[in-house]
Amino acid sequence: MTMLAVAAQVLLGLILVGTGTGHLTVLREEFHAQVPAWVPLDAGFVVIASGVVEVLLGLALLSVWRQPYRAVVGAVVAAFFVAIFPGNVAQFTGHRDAFGLDSDLERGVRLLFQPLLVVWALAATHVLRTWRAYRRRDSPA
């Protein structure tokens, strides 16, 4: 485990805990702008539920270090970032101001960073390396 990967995992965990806490406290209204209109649930519930999930994922990143569990956490975090991407798209297409993003250009640039979060989660937790090692181990000789 490299120090860079450890630092990346810790930083991502702290970001998720902080963002999730924001969902549950002072940033609740801001996060409402990201709930797509087509979601058949109350926007307040979605904001709170996703905040709880973010806090739990952040805590998992901060506490799970043994492979393959670390890779599983990383894969789940990456999947979470994919799952919330439609909320960022909804903010862009709905021209909704939040988090200081008050133009389509700013909201569009933000969309470009979502794939980087997916890569960050996968790389920091060595998902692909771990998956390949387990695949090799289970391959017939």
Image (cartoon, rainbow, N blue to C red):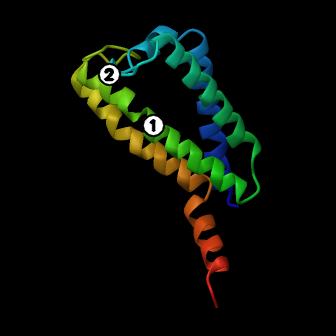
In this rendering, position of residue 135 left or right of residue 30: right
Q: Is mark 1 on a helix, strand or loop?
A: helix
Q: Nearer the viewer, residue 137 or 103?
A: 137
Q: Which mark is residue 83?
A: 1
Q: How far apart are marks 2 and 1 (CA)?
A: 15 Å
Between 22 and 45, the one nearer to me in the picture:
45
Instruction: Give the labeled residue for mark 2.
Output: 91
- Residue at horizontal 51 percent and vertical 38 percent from the top: 80
Q: Residue at x 57, y 16 (%)?
A: 48
Looking at the picture, which amino acid does disc 1 mark? Ala
Report the side of 9 relative to 46 (left or right).
right
- The three-letter code of the residue at mark 2 reads Gln
Q: Is 87 drawn above or below residue 78 in the view shown? A: above
Left or right for 56, reference 103: right
Q: Quadrant of residue 4?
A: bottom right
Mark 2 or mark 1, whichever is nearer to me: 1
- Local packing at callout 2 (Cα closer than 10 Å; few below 14, some 14-19, many 20+) is many
**Image position, residue 121 (x, y; %):** 55, 48
